Amino acid sequence: MASVIEVKGLKKSFGSHEVLRSIDFATGKGECTCIIGSSGSGKSTLLRCINLLETPDGGEILYHGEDILSGNVNMAQYHARVGMVFQQFNLFNNMSVLENCMTGQMKVLKRGKEEARANAVKYLTKVGMDAYINAKPRQLSGGQKQRVAIARALAMDPEVILFDEPTSALDPEMVGEVLNVMQTLAQEGLTMLVVTHEMGFARAVADEVVFMDQGVICEQGTPAEVLGNPKSERLKAFLASML
């Protein structure tokens, strides 16, 4: 299977601290890849580099075989095709739920108001938030905000969505509602890269699990291989700490 996103030799440092040390991995079309590891292992930085919220210090990030760091890729188009859902939702507080899901479509994809609205309502309905289209983010629970953030990402018709610990800021009873939406998306064949602490989700939904530790990928494979039969002491210790 051809890779949608492939990372080769990716490096990133903050000052003298090497956060990513020559990372290599790829994700294919329709795959859900879950990236696990303790805090500070480089997981979120990896996603932020793929989305170019951080500029890597070395290596390549290939999107359909083309290096997005080469300067030859249309970045507005790339960002429309590779969406991101953040830990802290990143909704516009001064806009309604509907406006949050329309504005990117109109600005970036140059859609007209009616088309953007119809598309926004479609995806808000999909995540169960269509009753809240006129609400402001401050009127919503954390789980509701995150579902709006997912609808906003989907409204851009992305090929890939990067999820950066999408449930870690949520109260425990709200985690399920967001994971259920994500599970549905995975089953429908959306290509997903998910940084998560939810081992049950990774076990049930991931095609591939990547375990990162101290800026390197220590183990990767199917959930059965990585979660069910860990090879390294580091991964065994991490999984024990998660239980």
Image (cartoon, helix red, strand yellow):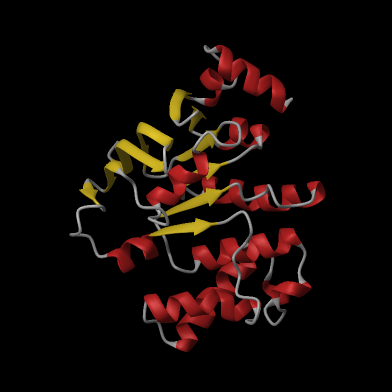
Out of 20 and 159, give the one closest to the viewer: 20
- Is 125 situated left or right of 83 in this image? right
Question: Which residue is the extreme one toward the front?
Answer: 16
Q: Position of residue 196 (x, y in %)?
A: 60, 40
Q: Is residue 101 above or below residue 145?
A: below
Q: Where is residue 67 in the image (x, y as percent from the top left)?
A: 23, 49
Q: Is residue 73 above or below residue 199?
A: below
Splitting the image into 4 quarters, where does residue 11 fall?
A: top left
User: How many numbered discs sit on the rendered protein?
Assistant: 0
Quadrant where the C terminus sits is top right
Splitting the image into 4 quarters, where does residue 57 fall?
A: top left
Q: Position of residue 157 (x, y in %)?
A: 43, 65
Out of 165 and 127, give the one closest to the viewer: 165
Out of 182 and 211, give the one closest to the viewer: 211
Name the residue at 44% across, 76% down: 105
Q: Position of residue 56 (x, y in %)?
A: 34, 47
Q: In this view, does 26 lie above or below 184?
A: above
Name the residue at 38% across, 32% down: 21
- Is 131 situated left or right of 212 in this image? right
- Is 167 situated left or right of 74 in this image? right
Name the residue at 52% across, 36% down: 35
Name the residue at 61% across, 30% down: 203
Question: Which residue is the extreme one toward the bottom?
Answer: 113
Quadrant where the N terminus sits is top left
